[in-house]
Image (spheres, helix red, strand yellow):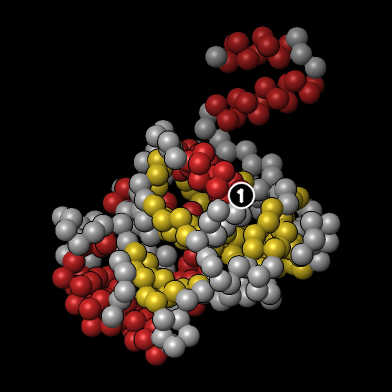
Amino acid sequence: YQRRVRGAIEGMNVRNCLSILILTLVFLGQVICITPTMIHLAFTGKDTERSVSFVTENVSRIVAAIQYGTSATQLTELGVGRSFVFQAGASNQYLINNVVATGLAADTTYYYRVGDNLTNTWSSVYTFNTKSSSITYAVYGDLGVANDVCLQQLITEAQKGVYDAVIHLGDFAYDLSDNNGLNGDNFMNNIQPIASVVPYMPSPGNHEAGTDNFTQYISRFSNVIDGAGASSESNTNLWYSFDHGLIHWIAIDTEVYHYFVDPNQIKRQLDWLEADLTKANRNRNQVPWIIMFGHKSWWMKNTNWDDFEQISNKYGVDIY
């Protein structure tokens, strides 16, 4: 392989040489992110905010930022956030960046781009809206890379505004860690046409357990920790809640009973769930519906639904 690349380079100009170099690095499993990729939105628990996560190459200095506004040519607002190094695979490392757009008005279309405010390197301009009524959700689970037969329809409908947010009930990519983490990278880029225009709210499934205790899931959707996880005081994206419109949404981790079982973790989730439902019931005049979601149903193995059922019935969860 190296001899073939060397022979090809000898007869080419500098521009083609650079192209061959980039292709060779990709072939060897290195992620080269010249501009932001894997862009995805999330609710934060505050109607006036949206969080955005994106990936860039691993550089020593970066000011992760979002520029946004109500015109594609006037992105006058700026928000900066945090960045951390993510080791997606043995030879697959990059920065995950999380930023928040604040001060958003209801029922407004916003234009935004994300990138590095230090080097002035930006993504393309995307849009999202802050619709506050007549909201439609796309709810699904078990979406892979190799057999994503519904992906194109989901993309088309997201771009047309058919639905306003996604609730993904676990099992992403099959699996996020496969092939040096490139399978997860491909999945995140595949959903970008959806997740860059509508909030993409996840919950973990059994395929996120992998061999790393949900690390791929936790890292790739870390903007949910900073947003809904912080505002709901769970401080995790394994379980969290947020209000949107007339619904109080609660994500739960149904896998906690089977994968990397920790009795203290089970108790932490149940204690948080009861406290969250107590607050949600106090606010039912404003947000009357409570919908809980997770990967597994009550009749499936390794779920121990009794714990969830008792609390759900006690506090009047409307739908699971």
With 12 as the anchor, is 303 left or right in this view?
A: left
Q: What residue is shown at x 39% (from left), y 34% (from top)?
A: 147
Secondary structure, mark 1, is: helix
Q: Is residue 76 visible?
A: yes
**In the image, residue 235 above or below residue 95:** below
Residue 153 on image: x %, y %:
50, 41
Find residue 268 and report its horizontal and vertical position in percent: 29, 75
- Residue 282 vs residue 166: left or right? left
Which amino acid, by three-letter code, is at mark 1? Lys
Side (left or right) of 16 relative to 136: right
- Say whether residue 252 is visible: no
Mark 1, residue position: 160
- The answer to whether residue 176 is left or right of residue 298 is right
Q: Residue at x 58, y 15 (%)?
A: 2
The image quadrant where one finds the N terminus is top right
Residue sitting farthest toward the right: 73
Farthest residue, direction bottom: 282
The residue drawn where x is 15% and y is 55% is 301
Asked if 200 appears above or below 194 in the picture, the reply is below
Is 311 located above or below residue 293 in the figure? below
Q: Quadrant of residue 296?
A: bottom left
Task: For the C terminus, give its image quadrant.
Answer: bottom left
**In the image shown, does 212 or 194 lie closer to the viewer?**
194
Tell me where residue 213 sits by quadrant: bottom left
Q: Position of residue 159 (x, y in %)?
A: 61, 48
| Residue 239 image offset from top left, x and y in percent | 37, 68
Q: Give the camera-side residue of 141 and 316.
A: 316
